[in-house]
Amino acid sequence: MKQSLELKLGQHLTITPQLQQAIRLLQLSSLELQQEIREAIENNPLLEEVEESPADVKAESLEAAADAELNGAEPGAEESATDAAETAAERETDADQEFDQEPAGDSDWEAAEISLDSPARKDQDGPAPDLDARNSAPLSLRDHLAWQMQMTPFTDGDRRIALALIDAISDDGYLSCGLDEIQQAVGGEPPPEIDEIQAVLHQIQNFDPVGVGARDLGECLQLQLRNLDPATPFLADAKRLATPEHLDLLAKRDYGQLRRLLKLKPEDLQHAITLIQGLNPRPGAGIQGTQASYVVPDVLVRKQRGVWRAELNGQTAPRLRINHGYEHMIQRGKDNADNKYLQDRLQEARWFIKSLASRSETLLKVARAIVDRQRAFFDHGPEAMKPLVLNDIAEAVGMHESTISRVTTNKYMLTPRGIFELKYFFSSHVSTADGGTCSATAIRSLIKKLVEVEKPLKPISDSTIAEILSKQGIFVARRTVAKYRESLHIPPSSQRKSLV
């Protein structure tokens, strides 16, 4: 085999560490990004957060007012924003007067400070939050019941039974096993009698929340009805209704059979049903068992002089810069360990700041493109939503479709109509009679409005909804209407029927 050398020319894509970091930051949510920034600041001494001074706050507010005036913003709104910024600056001056202002550096990287085009971050007035209480584990239903058990004068034997019963209560508040299984779980010589377990269960059923420890839905509702004021209107009819056989008929909405069995007028039956519907079928769910998740909007949308404008929410990420003190410690030409460490951290800090700036620029560009194409939604609501796919925005901003998908995932937009995920503004289209298209989001909104105004005695079916939409020039099949209705968590017409 003869060996030879040859020269080839080709192209291939290489993902550098900088590009990998930029892609990873791009797909993070606002809360995940804040955590990422905190970790970067803790691990890299050359990264630091910019502390806003009162002079910087006032200067930024005046600069924003000037930019808004050039863009045609309302003068009155800018004056109010400037006054608010000056007030915040005065408040920060009173709170931080013991700190010296940081001297300005002359490093080339001072210009690399990133800003998310928002007012300066301000400390909120009032006492500091209780971090221990906020980060502590949430109270579970079992803990809540066990605490009440400790306050109840049980004997040692009854306490063992109560613990076994509490362990057998599900998160919804129902007893998940039979009394004979509780008897086996308690054990002992001799084991407790069923009547004794029943007596302890009745004690637990008096605990908070009302209805806990029930063995079925009927018993749960009866426990809650028993806790109501005896003078409550139609209480006796509701107790008669809250039985397993009657609840089955109620679930089937067989009101005729219920009236015959209970011998009630339609109005009285409806009042009893309304009282039942006001009860909690899952009493245990009211005890907080999980920590709440919060949504922080990444983009703010406002209307300025008749034009909808999008801007980034600067509170989602702090402003970062290079620490000039550590940067000046780097000595050129030296190759010792300390100097090499600072050089590596400096390069990482520059990459991180650049990646954050790129993320903000990409997110703002995509958000503005979405707002520009969905102006009808902001003016008229979901019924005016236009069909939009990822490829439309990708072509508008000159990026790949996968990049648009990363940008719009777990990113939220605060609008006068509420907070929406960026992916909410993307939907498929349905052809109309005039050859145009209609957004699936708009069709779902129309279906919701039709159901809201239907007659309770005769709710409209999916076929009727399809016919109504076809008269408006929107041709959709009955099964498509059913799919959209289910996505809105609206039950079928047979389950929406009511007496009045």
Image (spheres, rainbow, N blue to C red):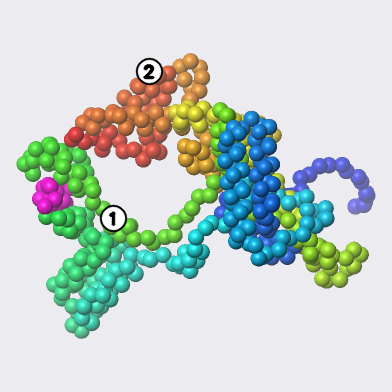
Magenta region includes residue 233 = yes
Q: Residue 95 in the image: state x and y as whole percent.
A: 60, 61
The residue singled out by tag 2 in the image is 471
Quarter of the image with the C terminus in it: top left
Relative to residue 177, is residue 445 depicted above or below?
Answer: above
Residue 260, x across and y down, in percent: 7, 39
The three-letter code of the residue at mark 2 reads Lys
Of the two numbered discs 1 and 2 on the same chain, state the one appearing first in sequence: 1
Q: Which residue appears at 68% of the width and 37% of the height?
A: 66
For the residues labelled 1 and 2, the Cα–Cα distance comes to 42 Å
Q: Is residue 445 visible?
A: yes
Q: Nearer the viewer, residue 146 or 432?
A: 146
Local secondary structure at mark 2 = helix
Stretch in magenta: 231-249
Q: How many discs mark residues in the rendered view? A: 2
For the question of whether residue 370 can be seen, the reply is no
- Residue found at x 49% / y 29%: 379
In the displayed structure image, the side of residue 170 where residue 476 appears, left or right: right
Image spot of residue 123 (x, y percent) = 57, 57
Left or right, residue 46 beside residue 181 = right
Please say whether residue 210 is one of the residues in the magenta stretch. Answer: no
In the figure, is residue 135 to the left or right of 328? left
Q: Secondary structure at mark 1?
A: loop
| On screen, residue 17 above or below 163 | above
* Image vertical order of residue 231 relative to residue 47, above or below: above
Q: Are marks 1 and 2 in contact (CB under 8 Å)?
A: no
Task: Residue 48: name its quadrant.
Answer: bottom right
Give whichever of 493, 316 is nearer the camera: 316
Tag on residue 282? 1
Per the picture, the main secondary structure of the magenta-coloured stretch is helix
Query: Identity of the amino acid at label 1?
Result: Arg
